[in-house]
Image: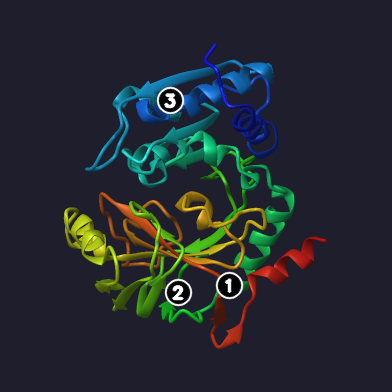
Amino acid sequence: MVRVNPEAYAGAKHALAHVLRVERHASLLVLTDEDASTVGWTFYEAARELGLAPCLTIMPPTGEGDGEPPALAAASLAGCDVFVVATSLRSKSMSHTRARRAACAAGARGVTLPGMNEELLSRPAVRADYEAIAAATEALASRLNGTKRVRVRTPAGTDVTFDVEGGVWFAERGLCDIAGGFGNLPGGEVSLAPASADGVLVVDASISVVGKVSTPLTLELAHGRLMGASGEGAEALLSFLRRFGPEAMNVAEIGIGMNPAARISGHVLEDEKVLGTVHVGFGDNSNMGGVPAGTVVSADVHIDGVVAAPVTMEADGVSVDPRTFFCLTE
């Protein structure tokens, strides 16, 4: 047995029992890379205590490029009932891979944990009230479906208008108990791949690859593309994205945080779930679903920049406050 962090162990056990709700007869795959293998072992040991019979697979970090797992791992994903994929920062998020999409199409369900470590797995956001989060995310997605324009503004200077006409808002419920479903852990967001976006985005919480930003990063968006950036780390960010070609500059996602237990920690996986925040993704949108016709962009990268609360959001000119949707569940 590998020695595991007790708080991380509690987080893994909670996820298996209350987020994934894995039944004893279900086949469970824990897939991890070498750098995140401690997290993989934590889920394995928690599953064993719950009376499950998990299979643990450790692969090399997938690195840059298409980020697809080895063929044998991909086949295991497609052949299991439930999966937990914990990967390090040296792997592309498994959320945005053909292997994950094929597994869900085959009926598997599970969670992807890009950049996961023991500290993050130990945080309260992992053990949030996902029954309440599921109801709230579904209600917000329902409210936003049919909207044509969403405008996001913050006191820090963000002012972006997203063309969302024809898109379908995805409720990342936190719970992952339906065949073919998937989400992150921590979970809880509502998102969509916009047809276009224009304005100024001030990232003042965190951004993938960099982590927590020490000073705000200002991004210029026009016609659905990242056109420029200024502030500390701007050139490093642009240089990173350019390695993946022009598709990496695509505005791939607008996401709304819906997890009341999440806090800004520098881990984008948690920061983008903080209730009242908004995050914008760049690069690939082909694995998101609900993408408006003619706007699918395939890229070998997907990163997110998180805008801290307070955020003012308008849907077709009408104010929408994500926090109020939790009143519907109380």
- Which residue corresponds to mark 3? 37
Q: Residues within 10 Å of mark 3 (few under 14, many from 20)?
A: many
Residue in front for this viewpoint, 91 or 157: 157
Label 1 crowd bin: few (<14), some (14–19), many (20+), radius 10 Å: many
Rendered-image quadrant of the N terminus:
top right
Residue bearing mark 2? 164
| Residue 13 placement (x, y as % from top left) | 65, 29
How crowded pointer 2 is (Cα within 10 Å; few <14, some 14-19, many 20+) is rated as: many
Q: Is residue 110 visible?
A: no
Vertical order, 242 against 54 (above or below): below
Name the amino acid, label 1: Leu
| Residue bearing the label numbered 1 | 144
Q: CA distance from mark 1 to mark 2?
A: 9 Å
Q: CA distance from mark 2 to mark 3?
A: 39 Å
Mark 3–mark 1 Cα distance, whole angstroms, equals 39 Å
Q: Can you name the residue that lies furthest to the front here?
A: 214
Q: In the depicted view, which residue is nearer to us: 277 or 166?
A: 277
Q: Is residue 9 left or right of residue 246?
A: right
